[in-house]
Image: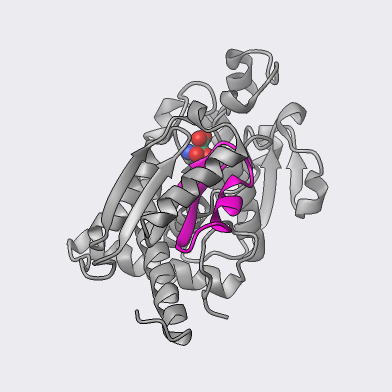
Amino acid sequence: MTFRARHLLGIEPLHPTEITELLDTAQHYAELNRQGRAPRDVLAGLTQINMFFENSTRTQASFEIAGKRLGADVMNMAMQASSVKKGETLIDTALTLNAMRPDLLVVRHPNSGAVDLLAQKVNCSVLNAGDGRHEHPTQALLDALTIRRAKGRLHRLSIAICGDIAHSRVARSNIMLLGKMENRIRLIAPPTLMPSGVAEFGVEVFDDMEEGLRDVDVVMMLRLQKERMDGGFIPSEREYFHRYGLDAAKLAHAKPDAIVMHPGPMNRGVEIDGTIADDINRSVIQEQVEMGVAVRMAAMDLLARNARAARQETGVMA
Ligand code: ASP
């Protein structure tokens, strides 16, 4: 099964072979990027619009660079989360943009499901750049590529995802992707930050870091998503760091060659000790950012190919 979809809305509908195809294409772009040989004609003549209704540093910059490297005309719409609160307004925005005939629409939105809804209303390909607590597919793909490059494989690894799992779309997309690729997933969080219904995910659950990290190959840390918390989920940041923050003593329980990941933005001294984040022998955080560009190039390349093929099939001039 090859990746023939029109949109990239989440990891959930993807088959493992589609994930592998996306990762192989991204791997190819990662090499070309390092050699400074990215092909400028892949998205030439196509218009990419980035619509971020929620703040972003890495993801927005990464999608913009990815599009430009492949020759797309990229436009960033300045959106304020506060200006679009109603579904109706979102749809109106989508219809307006649709009338400008973009080819690729990259959307981040604070509401889970908003990007899927928008995708139903437009004719172009939509890429989900994070919707509420729901999904962040390109983050999971870039994490997978980073793991595959560091460990030489993406199956039968023991992977710990730690911290604010309840509010994290990164955790959700990663649990799905890494599960589909047959890895062993451990979730480590205080009970207040563990999502309900976690048993359905087919994962092991821990509330103690030392126990949960024992012999894992990969340690994935998550930010405390305060903007999605509406009450006291943790006693204090200090106490949280003491119990759940990744420091050298806790990391010593993982395998000696375990890698440390974080999707960013990082809160040093809250979920991760700065010295661990900066330790080039353990941390692959910068590599994650680098792979982000390659993964987004791959996703947009494949979606543009699919759109071209669909147009040819329906007899419309490409
Ligand atoms: N940057 C990631 C996201 O947009 C993770 C985070 O914000 O903590 O979900």
Please indicate whether residue 106 sits to the left or right of residue 221 in the image.
left
Q: Where is residue 117 in the image (x, y as percent from the top left)?
A: 61, 51
Q: Which colour scheme is used?
A: one colour
Above or below residue 277? Residue 51 is: below
Residue 132 in sight here = no
Please indicate whether residue 150 sits to the left or right of residue 88 in the image.
left
Span highlighted in magenta in the image: 107-133
Q: Where is residue 228 in the image (x, y as percent from the top left)?
A: 62, 28
Q: Position of residue 91 (x, y in %)?
A: 55, 46
> Which one is in front, 271 or 310?
310
Above or below residue 68? Residue 311 is: below
How many labels, in total?
Answer: 0
| Residue drawn at x 58%, y 56% as measured from the top left | 10
Q: Which residue lies furthest to the left in this view?
A: 36
| Residue drawn at x 39%, y 75% as measured from the top left | 305
Question: Is 283 contained in the magenta span?
Answer: no
Please identify the quarter of the rendering in which residue 240 is found: top right
Image quarter where the C terminus lies is bottom left
Above or below residue 99? Residue 209 is: above
